[in-house]
């Protein structure tokens, strides 16, 4: 069997929907959480630790009949900045999208500071993205800076 064919078979084909590719394996389940997949009724195929020439290992998520808006997608830029979204219609990739980090993240990330008001009051967290390249964010309330590696997704 050809390598191409094997690659295709790693994750089942999608008729219509979105295939999110090049997810770092270690971030796959965080990505699933950020996208709210656990609350969706769509058919979802998740593959992890798939072979990738570029990355060694990668994860992939395919969601049938789901086309994300940019706001939904950009959330995952936080933890998986190099993902590629393949928009699929009738088994063909009609568009490829990359993600960009938004300027502000509301209600997505937990503040690492236990004394922060957001950890003590029932309110959404709010972070300003201060370095899009490095993925550094800053809490709007207590000004705690959090690096990408330490981000805890709510
Ligand atoms: Zn805070």
Image (cartoon, rainbow, N blue to C red):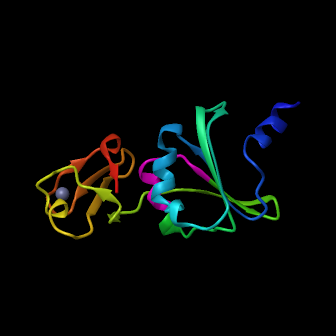
Q: Nearer the viewer, residue 103 or 91?
A: 91
Position of residue 103 measured from the top left corner of the image (x, y, whole percent): 35, 63
Residue placed farthest to the right in the image? 1
Left or right position of 111 against 149 = left
- Figure quadrant of residue 66: bottom right
Q: Residue at x 52, y 60 (%)?
A: 38
Q: Residue at x 49, y 62 (%)?
A: 36
- Is residue 79 positioned above or below 108 on the image? above
Q: Residue at x 32, y 65 (%)?
A: 107
- Is residue 20 positioned above or below 39 on the image? above
- Asked if residue 146 shows in the view, the reply is yes
Position of residue 20 measured from the top left corner of the image (x, y, whole percent): 62, 52
- Quadrant where ligand 1 appears: bottom left
Q: Is residue 79 magenta?
A: yes
Left or right position of 154 against 29 = left
Q: Which residues are magenta?
A: 73-84
Position of residue 16 measured from the top left corner of the image (x, y, whole percent): 75, 65
Please count the marks in the image: 0
- Give the position of the N terminus as an image quadrant: top right
Q: Is residue 33 magenta?
A: no
- Figure quadrant of residue 47: top right
Residue placed farthest to the left in the image? 115
Left or right position of 131 against 37 = left
Left or right position of 152 against 46 = left
Q: Nearer the viewer, residue 66 or 88?
A: 66
Q: Residue at x 49, y 52 (%)?
A: 31
- Asked if residue 19 shows in the view, the reply is no
Position of residue 147 measured from the top left corner of the image (x, y, whole percent): 29, 44
- Give the position of the C terminus as an image quadrant: bottom left
């Amino acid at each position: 069997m050809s390598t191409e064919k094997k690659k295709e078979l790693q994750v089942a084909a999608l008729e219509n929907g979105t295939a999110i590719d090049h997810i770092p394996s270690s971030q796959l389940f965080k990505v699933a959480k950020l996208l709210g997949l656990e609350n969706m009724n769509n058919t979802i195929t998740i593959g992890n630790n798939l072979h990738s020439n570029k990355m060694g290992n990668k994860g992939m998520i395919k969601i049938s009949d789901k086309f994300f808006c940019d706001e939904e997608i950009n959330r995952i830029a936080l933890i998986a900045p190099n993902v590629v979204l393949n928009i699929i219609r009738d088994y063909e990739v009609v568009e490829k999208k990359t993600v960009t980090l938004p300027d502000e993240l509301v209600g997505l990330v937990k503040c690492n500071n236990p004394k922060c008001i957001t950890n003590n009051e029932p309110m959404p967290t709010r972070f300003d993205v201060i370095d899009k390249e490095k993925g550094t964010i800053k809490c709007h309330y207590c000004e705690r800076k959090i690096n990408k590696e330490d981000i805890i997704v709510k």
